[in-house]
């Protein structure tokens, strides 16, 4: 049985303030929790007896066999699953996010947690190990973002730091998407450097844009068709990352 | 002022059953409603006086100047905007979705309305005018899907029909994404035909897969890195559409 104070604690982790205070986050569902267990310290694991029975050795800080209604009480999901875990947030080391040796993704104020989680997931697919976020980017340890990563959070490190100083200290190219950029399909792309993506509504901030060395653009089709529309930021990130990796693979 | 029965009617359009019964759908927010107004018949427009003042000629079926709290009562958004509209669903003609003359997107059971709306938006960007969906694909006129299209619904026609017969009657290549498919970066891609994308969890159904003439795959990076992960369906659709259009543009 979950105690009232445990339910209250889990629910409090819906807010960034309490996630930071405790240094923890919540993940839910069989696949996600199973994917994360080998990578993060588990502080509290709440699961139905049927789920526990399918597991081998479990060493979480505290293990609660859930009664009926326990998980729904604590869950952030519309359709609660049969397992919920509280993990410790990992330590990150920004010096590992070195764009002179690898491709790094930088996010300048991405607001939507679902977009952020989806970006973490696609970064994993395209072999990008570090995402550097401006402090006002959504928190990757929020419940919605965690669920959208689909376990990629175990492999992709997410850093929060002011982008202008980070980019200033970095060596190598910084690619940013702009409406007036050159088409990404033909612009030279390197195997290392920073891919910088902006906020859903406003794009890349002027002070961050100063660090951009290559302005690129995903052309709409056909090119002569006028459009005032744009692509969702996760979609644009995917197209850009795919094109970088296509070139690298040739 | 919105009457109680108007609020009830708008709220009922959260359910597909009532959207089909009335042949209508709800859109919210200044940009989205403004984008859709020229394209769809507007049955009911609810807006704050400040919004009305910024508009030119409006010819909706019924115009309601919203009092305080009117729109929040009827809204499907967490943060209600200052305009909400009920539009009539457009007629569609499946014969226009002819893959012998253009690139068509087909969706086999995409479940998440946000994914569907995002796919409509990116289809518009990449100049795909028709999306053909299996009957169990999410309803594009549901509130979440409509919002995620960001107005692209005005330009992209979405059809619902059993895919197996549709694909059987079509001429030309049918491209489907499969784990065992050939890398999309080098596989020949034509300028016409069908791009078939599957359900979030289960991919393309076996009975639909029979129509696939080209099995393709988005490679993860680096290719030798084993991964059990996958890409979100909207992300995969974007990468595939981008690659088709990159080739066409050369």
Image (tube, coloured by chain):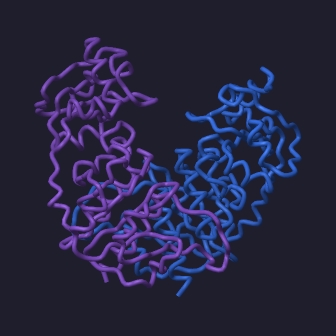
Chain colours: A blue, B purple
Q: Quadrant of the C terminus of chain B?
A: bottom left
> Residue at horizontal 12%, vertical 27%?
B61
Q: Is residue A178 visible?
A: no
How many marks the image carries: the answer is: 0
Q: Quadrant of the N terminus of chain B?
A: top left
**Front residue of B60 and B25:** B25
- Relative to residue A169, is residue A84 depicted above or below? above
> Residue at horizontal 22%, vertical 31%?
B54
- Relative to residue B112, is residue A124 depicted above or below? below
**Front residue of B14 and A53:** A53
Give residue B240's quadrant in the image: bottom left
- Quick check: B142 left or right of A121? left
> Residue at horizontal 32%, vertical 34%?
B16
Tell me where residue A191 appears, x and y as whole percent.
60, 80
Tell me where residue B49 appears, x and y as whole percent.
25, 21
Tell me where residue B165 appears, x and y as whole percent.
26, 62
**Front residue of A160 and B23:** B23
């Amino acid at each position: 049985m979950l105690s009232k104070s445990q339910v209250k604690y889990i629910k409090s982790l819906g807010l960034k303030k309490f996630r930071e205070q405790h240094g923890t986050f919540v993940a839910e569902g069989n696949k996600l929790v199973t994917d994360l267990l080998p990578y993060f310290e588990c502080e509290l694991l709440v699961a139905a007896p049927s789920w526990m029975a399918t597991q081998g050795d479990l060493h979480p800080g505290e293990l609660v066999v859930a009664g009926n209604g326990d998980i729904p009480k604590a869950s952030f999901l519309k359709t609660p699953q049969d397992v919920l875990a509280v993990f410790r947030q990992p330590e990150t080391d920004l010096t590992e996010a070195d764009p002179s040796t690898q491709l790094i993704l930088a996010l300048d104020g991405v607001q939507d947690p679902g977009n952020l989680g989806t970006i973490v997931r696609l970064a994993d697919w395209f072999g990008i190990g570090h995402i550097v976020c401006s402090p006002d980017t959504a928190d990757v340890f929020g419940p919605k973002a965690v669920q959208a990563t689909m376990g990629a959070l175990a492999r992709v490190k997410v850093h929060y730091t002011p982008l202008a100083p980070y980019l200033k200290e970095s060596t190598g190219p910084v690619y940013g998407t702009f409406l007036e950029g050159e088409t990404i399909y033909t612009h030279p792309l390197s195997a290392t450097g920073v891919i910088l993506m902006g906020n859903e509504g406003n794009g890349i901030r002027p002070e961050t844009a100063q660090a951009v060395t290559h302005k690129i653009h995903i052309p709409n089709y056909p090119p002569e068709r006028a459009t005032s529309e744009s692509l969702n930021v996760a979609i644009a990130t995917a197209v850009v990352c795919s094109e970088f990796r296509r070139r690298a693979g040739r």
